[in-house]
Image: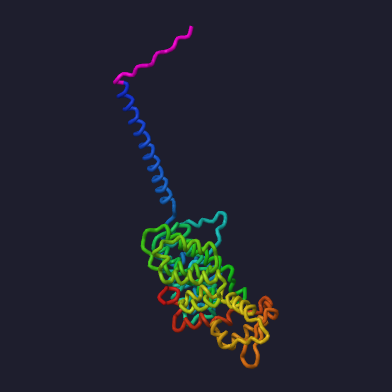
Amino acid sequence: MNRRRGARRISHSQRRDATTGGDWRQRQRTQGKDQVREEGERCEQQVKETVPRGICEAMCPARELRDREAQNRLHRFEMLAGTEKSRRPRGDPLRAVKEYSRPAAGKDSTNPSDLRPPAVLLKTVCYLIDDIAASRTLHPWSEIYGFVFDRVRAVKQDMIIQRLSGLDCVAILERTVRFFIYSSYHLCGEPLQLYDPCINDTHLQENLSWLFECYATETEPHPNQEEFQALGLLYNLGSTQATQHIMGLPERLRSTPAVKLALSINRAFLERNPVRLLRLAQGLNFLQCCALHRHLLTCRRDLLLIFSHGHSSRNCRFPLDRLAQLLSLDTALTAQLCQDYGVKVNQESQVVFSKAAFTEPEQGKLYCKLYHNIVAEKQRDLTVGSIIHGCA
């Protein structure tokens, strides 16, 4: 026989106990969150303790300097004066700089005595700029670039191993980015064995990305952020990723003059409006023009192509000097550029556009360096040191 159970009666004491149980569960959840937070802080502290910290106060560790002397691997910029022609030159401790070495199995790259602290790394970069890159006695500049490029890679390696951040890290990255941008202009057109633009571009993009990450994650003020946000967009003109990055910046940064100008130039490039782009480029400073220069030849080619279609007529004549003004070139270079693209210039210095005559030049025939005048005019009396240090 089934019996139905009556409703269970709950006493006042049980109700009080139930309330106490709810409080207990709340306390347990709070304690659990505190434990998770404490565990996270403990793990973070352990990571900080395991990250190596450099103690080498010289630009080149003493052990490496001895090894390179014994193996005759010193660069001529590092040799002690008077020993350059000897069978085994000696290294100058004040000029020798740690060279880049690839990570290898069994090789300890975390030895504190081989790592330089942030202040020494910044001092090393400043030495490479002031005494090597900006030197008036060292030549050629392609060799200077090769030496500085390798030593800057070693600086970056030390920074990564020590997981550096903060103002010293930003100062190093800013100078490194300026060096790579200036080199992309100064060594444009050099033989591939002396300067590889693809390798330079790879390292420039890596350092620029790291610099932007520092700007985004650190709370300290960065007075040069406007400059580098604009440089990044000008260098990567037309890039969707670069444009999205700029549009994600705070309004106060997007509305600064340098970034606004860079955005206007980028828009003209995307709209294939070379006349407006070249006109806006007149407002750029020297380093900004260095960042933009690799896009100028494409921009001028687009202008000639558009005019070849828009002014394609048997009786139409376009003044050569006016075209030179639009291209930001002198008349001689304008006539040469027209010839390279199959655009006819008659004896009266008039351009005869024809969409049928426009042709693409053979690969390697056009030399970008010939058309650098828009950049070169802005350098004037600026020294390499002032450009890379950001004093221009």
Residue at the image point whose x is 45% and y is 80% from the top? 383
Comparing 365 with 321, the one in front is 321
Relative to the observer, which residue lies in front, 274 or 65?
Answer: 274
Q: Is residue 188 above or below residue 335?
A: above
Which residue is at the front of the view, 292 or 380? 292
Report whether 350 appears left or right of 91: right
* In the depicted structure, whether residue 220 falls above or below residue 277: above
Q: Position of residue 261 (x, y in %)?
A: 46, 72
Looking at the rendering, the stretch of residues picked out in magenta corresponds to 1-13
Q: Residue furthest top?
A: 1
> For this view, does 268 lie left or right of residue 5?
right
Q: Quadrant of residue 115?
A: bottom left
Is residue 65 in view? Answer: no
Q: Does residue 2 belong to the magenta stretch?
A: yes
Give the number of callouts.
Answer: 0
Q: Is residue 121 left or right of residue 146?
A: left
Q: Spot the residue most to the right.
A: 356
Residue at 49% over, 83% down: 377
Examine the structure image and report whether residue 150 is included in the region drawn in magenta: no
Magenta segment, prevailing SS (helix, strand or loop): loop
**Residue 261 seen by the camera:** yes
Q: Position of residue 119 (x, y in %)?
A: 39, 65
Q: Give how far across and how far down residue 378 sits, in percent.
A: 47, 81
